[in-house]
Image (cartoon, grey):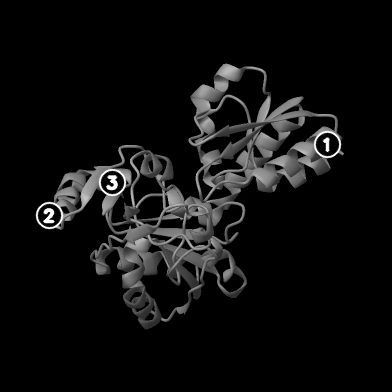
């Protein structure tokens, strides 16, 4: 079988080892060298070019709801990471107690979902009521993606706060922002052995600033990504019509990878509407023009009216 192996940036160091394993089984192997941002970002273009029979995608769980749009079979190979829980959870429980959070929503990424039962047990032994939700695109209970924080939002009404267990801020920032839980978010990072509360008010201030700038825009570029899990052409066309009905000029810009530096070369657009991954807006520092998500269009139109 002819295989195309695809790795996120953190696992590319394993590419040669995995390629040799598949070749030893008699497969012809190609490796995608392109950047990979998640389970929604599958290397179909490269797979078609080399006539691969299957993509083997490492590091993520299946992106639910995307199979119908897959022109080539995809095998997901997950990479669970078991880390020491006790040190950081002692700090997390102390932080929850200080904020008087008795009902706690628990979320994590696919790398740590196998440790959720242990995390729940530790919290319950500390007297907490633990609630775990499920996303719409995620394979596991309690799992969140950059674009799917429903596991947190769906339980927000039942908890005092959300505890995110995992490294970095990319995923918990999504939980605390629009479309997230709207509840205080405590990040328990086992790699840094640290805990940190996120302030949802900061995100709200940033969003209001972007909307204020976008109101003055006359010409909008509507961003469409051709990535399988992000392609939203009809939504982009609908946004274009609604903006034009308000007297704005709008054009749809199509690419696989949204590069803000490349967008600057157009010069004629005053603002952008992003229909791809909603977390692209987190890169707003790289964009000189305001970038709104599709979910912001309704609010923008109301302000224009």
Label 3 crowd (10 A; few <14 / some 14-19 / many >=20): few
Label 1 crowd (10 A; few <14 / some 14-19 / many >=20): few
Q: Which residue matches tag 3? A: 10
* Distance CA(mark 2)–CA(mark 3): 24 Å
Percent of width and height locating residue 278: 56, 46
Q: Residue at the location (46% across, 55% down)? A: 197
Query: Which numbered tag is attached to residue 24?
Result: 2
Percent of width and height locating residue 29: 23, 47
Horizontal side, residue 201 vs residue 296: left or right: left
Q: Residue at the location (68% across, 41% down)? A: 236
Quarter of the N terminus within the rendering = bottom left
Percent of width and height locating residue 253: 62, 31
* Distance CA(mark 3)–CA(mark 1): 43 Å
Q: In this view, does 189 lie above or below 33?
A: below
Horizontal side, residue 301 vs residue 104: left or right: right
Quarter of the C terminus within the rendering = top right
Quadrant of the rendered image containing residue 218: top right
Q: How many labels does the image show?
A: 3
Of circles 2 and 3, which is in front? Answer: 2
Horizontal side, residue 244 vs residue 289: left or right: right
Q: Which residue matches tag 1? A: 304
Q: Nearer the viewer, residue 29 or 86?
A: 29
């Amino acid at each position: 079988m002819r295989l195309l192996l695809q790795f996120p940036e953190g696992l590319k160091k394993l590419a040669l080892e995995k390629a040799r394993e598949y070749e030893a089984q008699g497969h012809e192997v190609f490796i995608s060298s392109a950047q990979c941002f998640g389970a929604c970002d599958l290397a179909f273009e490269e797979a078609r070019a080399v006539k691969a029979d299957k993509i083997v995608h490492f590091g993520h769980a299946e992106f639910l709801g995307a199979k119908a749009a897959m022109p080539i079979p995809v095998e997901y190979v997950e990479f669970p990471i078991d880390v020491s829980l006790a040190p950081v959870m002692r700090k997390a429980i102390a932080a929850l107690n200080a904020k008087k959070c008795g009902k706690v929503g628990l979320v994590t990424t696919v790398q740590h979902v196998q440790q959720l039962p242990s995390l729940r047990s530790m919290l319950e032994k500390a007297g907490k009521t633990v609630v775990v939700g499920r996303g719409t695109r995620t394979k596991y209970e309690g799992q969140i993606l950059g674009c799917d924080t429903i596991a947190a939002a769906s339980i927000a009404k039942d908890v005092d706060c959300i505890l995110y267990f995992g490294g970095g801020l990319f995923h918990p920032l999504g939980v605390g922002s629009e479309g997230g839980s709207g509840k205080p978010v405590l990040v328990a990072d086992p790699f840094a052995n640290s805990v940190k509360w996120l302030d949802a008010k900061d995100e709200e201030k940033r969003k209001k600033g972007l909307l204020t700038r976008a109101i003055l825009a006359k010409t909008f570029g509507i961003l469409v990504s051709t990535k399988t899990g992000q392609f939203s052409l009809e939504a982009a066309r609908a946004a274009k019509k609604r903006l034009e009905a308000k007297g704005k000029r709008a054009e749809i810009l199509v690419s696989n990878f949204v590069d803000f530096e490349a967008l600057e070369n157009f010069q004629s657009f005053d603002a952008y509407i992003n229909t791809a991954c909603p977390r692209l807006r987190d890169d707003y520092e790289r964009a000189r023009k305001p970038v709104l998500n599709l979910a912001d269009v309704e609010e923008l139109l109301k302000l224009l009216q």
